[in-house]
Amino acid sequence: MKRPITRFYALDTLRGLAAFLVIIFHFGIWHHRDFERPPLESWLPILYTNGWMMVDLFFCLSGFIFFWKYSGTIYEKNIGFKKFIFLRFSRLYPLHIVTLIIVGVGQLFVYLSDKEYFIFQLNDLKHLLLNIFFMSYWGFEDGYSFNGPVWSVSIEILLYLVFYFCCFRLKPTYFFLPVLMITLGWILLSGDYHFILFNTMVGRGLISFFAGGLSYQIFRMAIACHQKIYLGIVILAGCTALTFWAALNSLHFNFTAWFNEIVFLIGFPSTVLLLAFLDAEKVFEVIFKKLSYLGDISYGIYLIHFPVQILFHLASKQFQIDYSRTETFLLYLACTLGLAMASHRFFEIPCQRYLRSKFSTGQ
């Protein structure tokens, strides 16, 4: 590799695309009663059947990036726990708390009109407190609540904690760490456990996050290998990733959760690995640089799309909204994208800069 990598533009692009795939999937499942066939189903069949898988892709991407960016510095004690958590807090919390308030107010109006909440019914004090502290899916909950999709962010917070303490104690350059955590995740998932902090969703997160970390280990090893070995690994990753996505789109399978994880353990990590190699070789760098903005706003897309759905639902009380129309679907996407862009520029970045300058911590 001739130049050091300062940012994985292709992976950021993939994160943005994954966010779009999730919100398309949610449009289909939240409004399945409103149409016989969802808009653009012939164009997007994979999304309306298996779009939920993109959450696992998020976990996998996070694992790769965190192993790349933080594993070495944590092990060498160059970044302390307090600073590590503060960096995550300043990035994630401001938008989370604002969207939580918006959803809470929106659901109140929905309840006054419909005598029930929109989609997620557990909007009581207990679940409000769990959401405030990013614990909405740690095993204390009775189900999805408030801004429901945030469940995966709450799992990711747990993964950050596990990641930090593992890297603090175990040398992260070894394959042992990710393999150990993947095994633990597999035990939780296949055993169908539902204990606090030890449940299937945490297992699902452990598998995908540390599979991403394992992908980084393979990437780091491949970069140091002889050119022929390096090329062979690139070709293998490419063939595996392309085969996976072709099968996923054409077969329309919907396996049981545990079997899906076998597929994810191969398909998503190989995809992440392939794009990392493209970044390393600066392939399509100009294109990925432009598209990587989607990765910057992916968090906003993910958190904002359910509040947008609530606004659509409230608007349907005054205006006739046909969810089967492609125009409605595109308007939903446009509103979510526009608000995510505005949020990133005028709220998330300013909040992040303010918090990090005002409450800057040492190691």
Image (cartoon, rainbow, N blue to C red):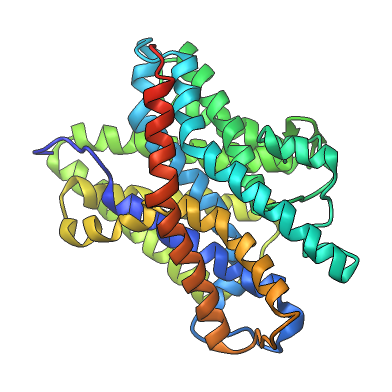
**In the rendered image, which quarter is residue 53 located in?**
bottom right
In the image, residue 20 sits, relative to residue 272, either above or below, namely: below
In the image, residue 48 sits, relative to residue 53, either above or below, namely: below
Residue 233: % across, % down: 27, 46
In the image, residue 185 sits, relative to residue 255, either above or below, namely: above
88 sits to left or right of 350: right
Q: Which residue is at the far left?
A: 2
Q: Quadrant of the N terminus?
A: top left
Residue 240: % across, % down: 39, 58
Front residue of 197 and 148: 148
Residue in the picture at 46% in, 55% down: 267
Residue in the picture at 31% in, 57% down: 238
Residue in the picture at 64% in, 35% down: 185
Residue in the picture at 40% in, 59% down: 341
**In the rendered image, which quarter is residue 65 located in?**
top left
Q: Quadrant of the C terminus?
A: top left
Residue 206: % across, % down: 59, 36
Front residue of 207 and 104: 104
Front residue of 246 and 76: 76
Q: How many marks?
A: 0
Residue 60: % across, % down: 48, 45
363 sits to left or right of 81: left
Can residue 102 be seen by looking at this rendering? yes
Can residue 271 be seen by looking at this rendering? no
Front residue of 148 and 53: 148
